Image (tube, grey):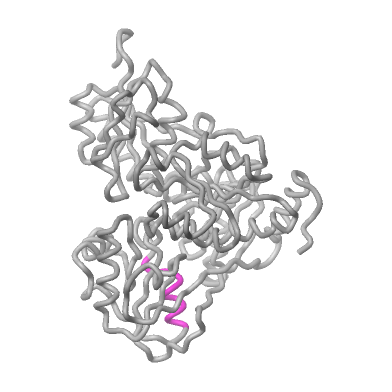
């Protein structure tokens, strides 16, 4: 235990996002605590870096090292660590407690910091869109909301969960309004998947590392803040309205992952997404499970119709399906919208494993649940190159890409690319649009004209 003569020593376990935010909110200016290290998981290339002194503040003139999570016990012993803080998302409850056991075994306390200590307050209304799992369809909902807000004449700032994969000091506050902004920031595929659709929809997107500064920048340009969450994390901003998605395709995972159960219990409105794809029985199972956890929030059902662009006849054609990376990897889905669209179109789906570049093959080994699809991984140039090689090596007539970005513009591949899109549509009563419009009328004025 820490004595009265020294700062309490802390390790923060993270994945390059929530961990940095919790440090900024709780530890950066605390003279009674010393964060000796971050540990990194989920995202390749995070370990081995330094959380820079420009962001860490005057108590950390050398910055803070970021180590691989596998080094946790060694770090705790070396620095006589008092507290291990868990600060990342979309992991099973059991996995969190296994990590807790590792911390406890070397004598440290194991901590989870909650919304009261980590949420920033905005002077503007905040609508937060979160989910119980990665890949539920948060961004489609956020884009739908942005259109309704703009129909009222409101200026909307979309704030994304952090994805700081490059120079952390340079990425402290990011603003994206055009494709040129994405190119100038050298955004990864994962970043582009989140930002490009919002930009195409007419939204300005803010992100970064220091979310107090990110919020201040967004507030200068907006009437409403729209938080588009990452993974199944809770918002960094205190929401005025909190919309939480559960996935009808995964009705047994409503409370299985942390902090997804937390956001479900906090929800003001619960959306059962992909009700059409899953069918009535699975959608009802998801709704019943959600209501058992949070009985006060209204539950609405949403369809996720899939369209192909350009419209192409795929019947009998050999097709390689590329799916959203995080949804297929740590999101736990065997396939996504691309596989569904190609199957419905009568395509012959080709399993990409035998054509996978070595780094892609490692992903299949790490996530054996993945089906006959290619996860669009691109956290760095090496992964982007491996993705392009894998696609180019596949003897197929078409590539069906269900990534939110246009990979044909980003990757040099020889096959024609057909894009698959999930849309958002109301399905049944009550309608989420009616519930949201009632909130908007209370906060920003006259009802929508559409």
Dominant SS of magenta comes to helix
Position in image of residue 42 (x %, y %): 31, 49
Closer-to-camera residue (289/114): 114
Determine the residue positioned at 30% across, 15% down.
2
In this rendering, would 123 be left or right of 204? right
Magenta residue span: 334-344
* Quarter where residue 55 is shown: top left
Position in image of residue 380 (x %, y %): 30, 55
Position in image of residue 328 (x %, y %): 37, 63
Residue 421 falls within the magenta-colored stretch: no
Determine the residue positioned at 44% across, 60% down.
193
Q: Is residue 102 above or below residue 260?
A: above
Q: Is residue 13 above or below residue 414?
A: above
Q: Quadrant of the N terminus?
A: top left
Q: Is residue 374 above or below residue 224?
A: below
Residue 341 falls within the magenta-colored stretch: yes
Q: Is residue 48 above or below residue 152?
A: above
């Amino acid at each position: 235990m820490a004595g009265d003569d020294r700062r309490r020593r802390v390790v923060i376990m993270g994945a390059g996002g929530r961990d940095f935010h919790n440090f900024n909110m709780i530890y950066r200016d605390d003279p009674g605590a010393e964060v000796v290290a971050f540990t990194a998981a989920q995202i390749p290339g995070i370990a081995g870096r330094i959380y820079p002194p420009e962001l860490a503040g005057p108590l950390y003139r050398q910055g803070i090292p970021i180590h691989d999570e596998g080094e946790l016990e060694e770090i705790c012993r070396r620095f006589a660590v008092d507290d291990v803080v868990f600060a990342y998302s979309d992991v099973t409850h059991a996995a969190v407690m296994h990590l807790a056991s590792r911390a406890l075994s070397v004598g440290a306390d194991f901590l989870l910091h909650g919304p009261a200590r980590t949420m920033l307050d905005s002077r503007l209304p905040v609508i937060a869109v979160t989910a119980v799992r990665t890949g539920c369809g948060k961004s489609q909902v956020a884009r739908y909301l942005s259109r309704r807000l703009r129909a009222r004449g409101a200026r909307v700032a979309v704030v994304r969960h952090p994805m700081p994969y490059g120079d952390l000091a340079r990425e402290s506050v990011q603003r994206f309004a055009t494709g040129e902004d994405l190119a100038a920031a050298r955004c990864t595929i994962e970043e582009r998947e989140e930002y490009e659709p919002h930009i195409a929809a007419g939204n300005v997107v803010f992100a970064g590392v220091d979310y107090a500064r990110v919020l201040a920048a967004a507030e200068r340009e907006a009437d409403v803040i729209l938080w588009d969450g990452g993974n199944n994390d809770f918002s960094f901003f205190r929401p005025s309205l909190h919309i939480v998605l559960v996935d009808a395709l995964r009705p047994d995972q409503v409370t299985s992952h942390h902090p997804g159960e937390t956001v479900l219990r906090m929800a003001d409105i619960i959306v059962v997404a992909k009700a059409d794809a899953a069918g009535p029985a699975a959608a009802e199972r998801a709704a019943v499970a959600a209501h058992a956890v949070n009985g006060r929030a209204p539950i609405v059902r949403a369809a996720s119709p899939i369209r192909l662009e350009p419209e192409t006849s795929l019947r009998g054609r050999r097709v390689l399906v590329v799916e959203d990376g995080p949804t297929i990897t740590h999101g736990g889905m065997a396939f996504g919208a691309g596989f569904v669209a190609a199957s419905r179109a009568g395509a012959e789906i080709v399993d990409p494993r035998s054509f996978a570049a070595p780094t892609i093959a490692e992903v299949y080994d790490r996530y054996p649940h993945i089906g006959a699809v290619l996860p669009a991984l691109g956290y760095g140039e090496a992964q982007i190159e491996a993705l392009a090689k894998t696609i180019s090596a596949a003897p197929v007539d078409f590539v069906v890409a269900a990534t939110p970005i246009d990979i044909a513009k980003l990757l040099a591949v020889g096959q024609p690319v057909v894009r698959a899109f999930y849309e958002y549509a109301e399905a049944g009563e009550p309608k989420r649009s009616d519930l949201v419009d009632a909130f908007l009328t209370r906060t920003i004025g006259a009802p929508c004209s559409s």
